[in-house]
Image: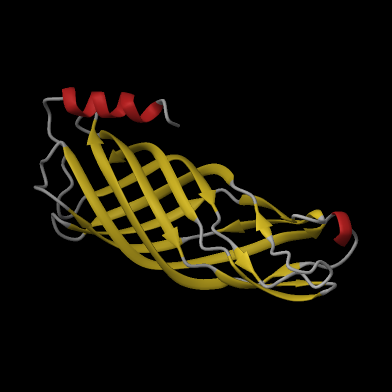
Amino acid sequence: MKALLPVALVSALCSTAALAHQAGDFFVRGGVATVMPNESSDDVAVSDNQELKISNDTQLAATLTYMITDNIGAELLLATPFKHDVSTAKLGKVAEVSQLPPSLMAQYYFGKSNSDIRPYVGAGLNHTVFFDAKGKGALAGTNVSVDGTWGLAAQAGVDMKINDKLFANASVWYMNIDTDVHTAVGTISTKVNPLAVMVGVGYTF
């Protein structure tokens, strides 16, 4: 991921054609995204002063954007399921769970519609669905479930021209995910609140 971004930047800066994000355009972005939880939780009942820890995961992701005006867009984020290990410092891994975080964003693109580089910011709504939760280690063989959530989301990114149709993209997302984890030892209120980083390419229709 780190190697792709300098190449994309050089390609964008050396290009002479303009990147057109203008009213009426549809474009898709695809690439890899890493979700990095900034978690906090109630203490796990069987382990005093031990909060849940949630691992990072990297998966394929895609966005679909429609430009309402030359500077305002609407974007839908989709991805393949992210899978996370859940652990505590004393007990180690106690569960694993998969999640999908579809998000709908309103965006503002800086600069003119024919600029080679278009930074943007966005804000909107995230709906995270958790599934395939399984108890592991100390919770092996027990029922574990995680409630789906609705929350706010924010993003910042930049599109960089490669040719008339293709562009490189880098973006950062923040999602408010506040859920309840139900286990054999009780319900644990958990804030996930991940930062997600996506790097990829886009295509304008």
- Residue drawn at x 54%, y 58% is 38
Q: Is residue 70 left or right of residue 7?
A: left
User: In which image quadrant can residue 29 be found?
Assistant: top left
Residue 205 visible in this rendered orientation of the protein: no
Against 114, residue 144 (above or below) is below
Q: Position of residue 34 (x, y in %)?
A: 51, 44
User: In which image quadrant can residue 123 be found?
Assistant: bottom left
* Residue reaching furthest to the right: 141
Against 45, residue 12 (above or below) is above
In this view, the residue in front, 123 or 93, is 93
Residue 45 visible in this rendered orientation of the protein: yes
Q: Position of residue 4 (x, y in %)?
A: 39, 27
Q: Is residue 153 left or right of residue 82?
A: left
- Residue drawn at x 24%, y 28% is 162
Q: Is residue 166 left or right of residue 100?
A: left
Q: Is residue 188 left or right of residue 174?
A: right
- Residue drawn at x 35%, y 30% is 5
Q: Quadrant of the N terminus?
A: top left
* Residue reaching furthest to the front: 49
Q: Position of residue 149 (x, y in %)?
A: 56, 72
- Residue drawn at x 24%, y 24% is 11
In this view, the residue in front, 7 or 89, is 89
Q: Position of residue 51 (x, y in %)?
A: 69, 64
The way the protein has been coloured in the rendering is secondary structure
Numbered disc total: 0
